[in-house]
Image (spheres, grey):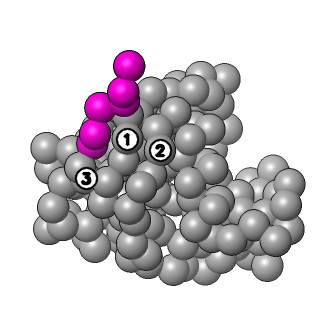
Amino acid sequence: MKRYVRIVVKRDGKLLLLYQKGLGRYLFVGGKVGDENPNESWEDAAIREFREEVASQITDMVLISERVVTLDDDANRGMWLGRYYFAERIIGEPVNQEVDKHSDLSYWPCLPCEGMHRVTIDVIELVKNLPDTIIVPRES
């Protein structure tokens, strides 16, 4: 079974979401696990994906959900096992580093909205009462 990881960041009661052009929906930051390194751990994948996609570093995170989903789009067809981590502390303000893949990176209220995947909506329910992520500025 293929694996993916998503990272949830919360700021001022809002959640950080990317609009993924290829899928046409809002998702938490993340991606595939073990694509280039089959022995990559879930946590290492979360740290790598977060750094690659938004140029920030996760220093503390906690697993909040594990889901099996079936995708039917051409690029990702099949069964996937996903893990969702809540970033308790990060270094650096997230910035969209993959503008070719993501047309938007922004904080959204902890409410479901049109264009969100059903799993994203489920995870919002899990994190809406958690405290905000601590975002430490980058050192110059």
In the rendered image, residue 39, in percent from the top left (x then y), is placed at 82, 71
Disc 1 residue type (three-letter): Ile
Q: Write down the quadrant of residue 139 in the picture.
A: top left
Q: Position of residue 127 (x, y in %)?
A: 26, 67
Asked if the stretch drawn in magenta spans residue 67, the answer is: no
Identity, as a three-letter code, of the amino acid under mark 2 = Gln
Q: Residue extending furthest top?
A: 140
How far apart are labels 1 and 2 at the CA level?
Answer: 5 Å
Residue positioned 63% across, 50% down in the render:
48
The reply to whether discs 1 and 2 touch (Cβ–Cβ < 8 Å) is yes
| In magenta segment, residue 138 | yes
Describe the element under mark 3 as helix, strand or loop. loop
**Distance of label 3 from label 2 (alpha carbons):** 12 Å
- 44 vs 94, left or right, is right
Name the quarter where the C terminus is drawn: top left
Neighbour class for label 3 at 10 Å: few (<14), some, many (≥20)? Answer: many
The residue nearer to you, when weighing 32 against 136, is 136
Question: Within 10 angstroms of label 2, few (less than 14), some, or many (20 or more) residues?
Answer: many
Extent of the magenta region: 135-140
Q: Nearer the viewer, mark 1 or mark 3?
A: 1
Q: Is residue 127 left or right of residue 55?
A: left
Q: Which mark is residue 57?
A: 2
Pointer 1 residue: 91
**Foreground residue, 45 or 12?**
45
Q: Is residue 78 visible?
A: no
Residue 62's image quarter? bottom left
Q: Position of residue 106 (x, y in %)?
A: 34, 33
Residue at the disc numbered 3? 133
Q: Position of residue 49 (x, y in %)?
A: 61, 48
